[in-house]
Amino acid sequence: MNLSAVVTRPGSFAVRAFFPRAIGLAVGFICVAAVLLDRQTPGWVWGVLVGFCFIWPSLALSLSQRARSATISERRFVLFDSLMGGFWVATMGFNVLPSAMLVSMMAMNNTATGGARFVLQGLSAQLIGAGLSVLVLGFEFSPYTSQLQMYACLPMLVVHPLTIGMVLYRLASQLGENKRALRSLSRTDSLTGLFNRGYWNELLQLEFSHCQATRGVASLALIDLDNFKLVNDRHGHVIGDELLRQVGQCIRRNLRAEDMPGRYGGDEFCVVLPGARAQDAWEVLERLRTEIAALDFPLAPKLSASLSIGIAECDPRMSDVLAWVHAADSALYDAKRLGRNRISLAQPLQRDDAAVALATD
């Protein structure tokens, strides 16, 4: 799995912050402009309003994309948004409904950006912005909201929360995907793509418990890549890793959908085959053994590979999962002892063997 699917690119964060800012300031312009139309507003104030609502979002996007940390720069930009929000609240003479809308929307932005503590920082920035407006334009208190101004607030009331909600929904979806990807990475061997040993052991224990509880059937196969140390010594670790990767691909390709393959160790693999008798497992793994023996390696034409495989069927008389593993391991040892490149089936438990297995229960 590609790790880039888990890590968010810095540029995407800046773009994700751009759209809610652009949409929010565009509808905010309608709200503030409706109030300023009823007042004697200097032309430069209109210029600042137009620049802040329609030019600032693109400028913030450009600065964020160039910043070393998009997250830190965005927090600063949100504080600047709060400062300007306080400026417009005072410039509107603290008109009740538009001012309440601006303050609540800024609080929403601040909460989404940095939580409750950041809301306090945003409030401080708003007070500074209001102070700047009073210092430059003077103090005026005109709380009355006309019907036109009330209607002008409706786009902000509807559009901005919807935009924030969509952004948070997309973020939650992405976090969910990342969480699933990380969970998959924690269960998977990065070289072969098979289950790693820790997670595979959990699956093995679950299948053993299921068989013991239901008297079900399952087989366990331990697979050893013959003479792998010689491959590393003669051809190098790069070729050795490529061989392991190809073996992992062959294992996935030849097994049934319900089978559970894992990498047991350096050159050892393991497979749990639910519902399979030992002979059924032998037929599945014989196809795998044959394919591995026929593999070609363009980077190492003289290289050949083979597998030794031990298979053990789960027996209800086994005391625990380790007894099952021991039976498969003994079969694997027999396959190696008999010359490698073969499959060996574990012998069924005899009465004496079963008594020994159960003695530790």
Image (tube, helix red, strand yellow):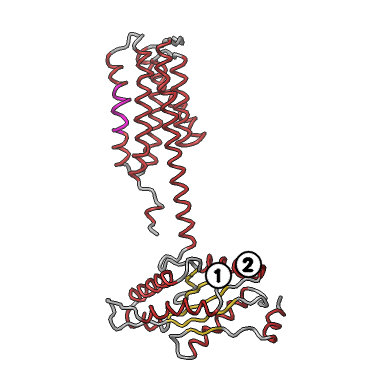
Going 32% across and 39% down the picture, which residue do you hit?
A: 64
Q: Please, is residue 209 above or below residue 66 in the view?
A: below
Q: Earlier in the sequence, mark 2 or mark 1?
A: 2
Residue at horizontal 32%, vertical 31%?
A: 57
Does 197 lie within the magenta span? no
Residue 332 location, x and y as percent? 51, 83
Residue name at image x 66 percent, y 75 percent: 316
Cβ–Cβ under 8 Å for marks 2 and 1: yes
Instruction: Report the quarter where the N terminus lies.
Output: bottom left
Q: Which residues are magenta?
A: 50-59
Quarter where residue 358 is shown: bottom right
Kindly report the distance in space between the C-alpha atoms of the residues bearing marks 2 and 1. Answer: 10 Å
The tag on residue 274 is 1
- Secondary element under disc 1, as helix, strand or loop, is strand
Name the one closer to the observer, 125 or 51: 51
Which is nearer the eye, 14 or 157?
157
Residue at x 65%, y 74% (from the top left corner): 320
Q: Quadrant of residue 296?
A: bottom left
Q: Label 2 amino acid? A: His
Magenta highlight: main SS: helix
Residue 359, horizontal then vertical, whole percent:
72, 80
Query: In which quadrant is the C terminus drawn?
Result: bottom right
Left or right of residue 359, residue 260 in this image: left
The three-letter amino acid code for the residue at tag 1 is: Pro
Q: Residues within 10 Å of mark 1 (few under 14, many from 20)?
A: many
Query: Which residue corresponds to mark 2?
Result: 210
